[in-house]
Image: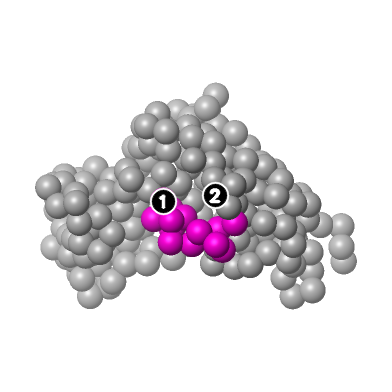
Amino acid sequence: MLLQINNLSCVREDRTLFEHLSFAVAPGDLVQIEGPNGVGKTSLLRLLTGLSQPFAGEVCWNGESIRSCRDEYHANLLYLGHQPGVKAALTPLENLAFYQKLHHPAQSTVDLWQVLAQVGLAGFEDYPTGQLSAGQQRRVALARLWLSEKPALWILDEPFTAIDKQGVKVLERLFLAHAERGGMVILTTHQDMTLMEGRLKTLSLTPSLQE
């Protein structure tokens, strides 16, 4: 499996964020998208997921445009954006059970209580998610990663937001384990990642010179 980005350009509101961007992500790769705020990191991730369309260029999965292999590509993709994407009225346990049933029914034997404990939510499993802090809601969303071995490609926009240092290390270990299984991780973050140092590839976006 291979993600190939060919000559990609992104324009937002008549402003060119980046252009002629090409790179590839192969099994086992851990890639950090770097750059100052407003340079287009989130826009790039949305292009990679197919949620937005590029001004020019193409995103390919195994040599085929993701527009023509949409179902296959999305079956191999897990995307977590800025918003946690959880249901406030449901508990963390109910949110995770809903996600599991919808996306990974074959993993019904996974201990969801243990998964929530992994992200530091032991004791909060039955609280309405809307009553939890922003960091705890983020942890509910991140708990999906423990149910998502099959999606080969994880695309994560600021996954460490509102996560403490210990939580960052837990996630780093998970990312490394995913890469060891042949998975791929693309992420944006302003956090230092000490455990992944040496394994992490970086792609730097620079501000456009266009006024």
Compared to residue 74, the image places residue 116 above or below, namely: above
Q: Quadrant of residue 17?
A: bottom right
Depth check: 82 or 11 in front? Answer: 11
Q: Secondary structure at mark 1?
A: loop
Q: Amino acid at mark 1?
A: Asn
According to the picture, the residue beneath numbered tag 1 turns out to be 76
Q: Quadrant of residue 2?
A: top right
Of pointers 2 and 1, the one earlier in the residue sequence: 2
Q: Secondary structure at mark 2?
A: strand
User: Looking at the picture, how far across and down is residue 31, in whole percent?
Assistant: 56, 39
Which region shows up in magenta? Answer: 65-78
Q: Is residue 187 magenta?
A: no
Pointer 2 local density, CA inside 10 Å: few below 14, some 14–19, many at least 20 = many
Residue 137 shows in the view: yes
Calculate the distance from the C-alpha at mark 2 to the C-alpha at mark 1.
10 Å
Residue 173 shows in the view: no
Q: Amino acid at mark 2?
A: Trp
According to the picture, the residue beneath numbered tag 2 turns out to be 61
User: Looking at the picture, how far across and down is residue 89, in whole percent?
Assistant: 23, 75
